[in-house]
Image (cartoon, coloured by chain):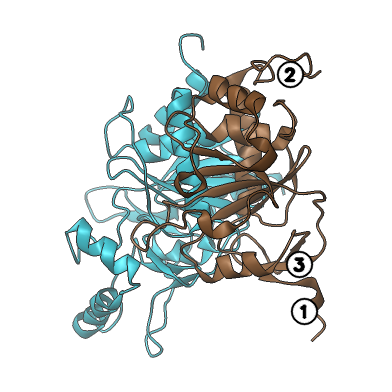
Amino acid sequence: MSPTADGTRFGGGFTDPSRDAARAFRTIMTVLARPGEIGTLDQVHAPAPLSQAQAALILTLCDTNTGVHLAGAADDSAVRDWVRFHTGAPLVAAEDAEFAVGTWDALQPLDRFAIGTSEYPDRSATLFAEVPVLAPEGATLKGPGIRNTARLSLPETGALQDNATLFPLGFDVYFTCGTALAGLPRSTQITAEDAQCT
Amino acid sequence: MSGYNFAYLDEDTKRMIRRAILKALAVPGYQVPFASREMPMPYGWGTGGVQVSAAVLVPEDTMKVIDQGADDTTNAVSIRAFFQKTADVAVTEATGKATLIQTRHRIPEEPLTKDQILVYQVPIPEPLRFLEPRETETRKMHALAEYGLMHVKLYEDIARHGEIATSYAYPVEAAGRYVMDPSPIPKFDNPKLHSAAIQLFGAGREQRIYALPPYTPVVSLDFEDHPFEARKAEGACGLCGAEDSYLDEVILDDRGGRMFVCSDTDYCRTRREAEEAA
């Protein structure tokens, strides 16, 4: 069932907004609290090229108070209409965004995004980055939310390691792949896969 | 119940609180400001915890509410009834059966699991507030990680009392960065802050939310020659005989009669039922 597949830009939202959003948020919160864990968000649909997980992140977290940046192919008229209709969120430039949506490549360069200030580290951006694969393998993660270590396929490690060095400043990332979702807060320490055999 | 949105709060408010919770989890121990709403209960009765619980609850949850460890006190009973009425969630008094536990001033004795969420009611979220009343200053102190004043306070405890006399709301350092108030839990509970569960802290009047993701390193502040010591009243529970649980003193009469009992009522009852069954 894909209400947006018929060409309407207004379908695809939560069936039972209050309870569905609560369930989606629980998944969103859990994967951010436990980096490396992969959750599923399959309740909603947005026009292509947004994935179902990105659509659920937008409907659960964005509203008239949050500037949303659509990057690359996501900055499409159907997507713009869908985001505006469902959330009322102002569409803004990367520098002003509280949330940024796109493929990992389209979201580059990352230094455009807000990292907060030392007095208000919460005034930072969160990225909803679509990646081709999302699996519990690859780079090694350590930090809050992780008992010993966890592993997560990251599209690159350098920029994310740099982001982690800014802690408590920095942006947070949700990696999405279709209906799959993983969270990477700024607090996570990352070791690249090929750097492990030391 | 019809007439209320699920879990009482409107969707805009829940989204705002949810965004604050995510920021709090990303920066453990940092107090995220949020636009706290007026709730149908007075400040001091857990308005912060209630708002956090409302934003996190799902219809499938089983909720437990405790006040100082007890399920049957006024505050716990009314908050439990509030969510039964507005969110139609299942409730329990059994720690192990709960998926979401809202607490005032205790951490349950039974270790929490990865599938549980613990929501704390927080009166004063700022650990430095009684040392420095100005918010502009404490904010700067957190920004600079300038926590010398807190160590001076603990040192003065030692100078005056021979030991660190702070017995509740004992300050901790979260994830090696922010000094955090664990809410007025007894320092006996501080070691349990290192937990498999997600821990969320809500301060309604002070409009702050902070959090500890699972297994976040939490260090109770101390000195090499005066190490932190979790402490409770000497002796065993007068009802179940537990020697490892935090004890409340209960006055029995006006001739000095008293007994010590488990503060965690579920822990105490479970032990007594197991003993009777044996």
Can residue B88 be seen here? The reply is no
How far apart are the two marked residues, 3 and 1, measured between alpha carbons? 9 Å
Residue type at numbered disc 3:
Ala
Residue A35, x across and y down, in percent: 67, 57
Number of marks in picture: 3
Q: Are marks 3 and 1 on the same chain?
A: yes
Q: Which residue is mark 2?
A: A4
User: Residue B22 location in percent, x, y?
Assistant: 52, 47
Residue shown at 30%/81% (left/top)? B163
**The label number, if any, that marks residue A139 in the structure image:** 3
Q: Colour of chain A?
A: brown
Chain for colour cyan: B
Q: CA distance from mark 1 to mark 2?
A: 44 Å
Where residue A190 appears, as percent x and y from the top left, is: 67, 69
Q: Secondary structure at mark 3?
A: strand
Decide which of tag 3 and tag 2 comes sooner along the chain: 2
Q: Residue at x 33, y 72 (%)?
A: B144
Would you say B53 lies left or right of A14 here? left
* Along the line of sight, the residue nearer the viewer: B83 or A124: A124
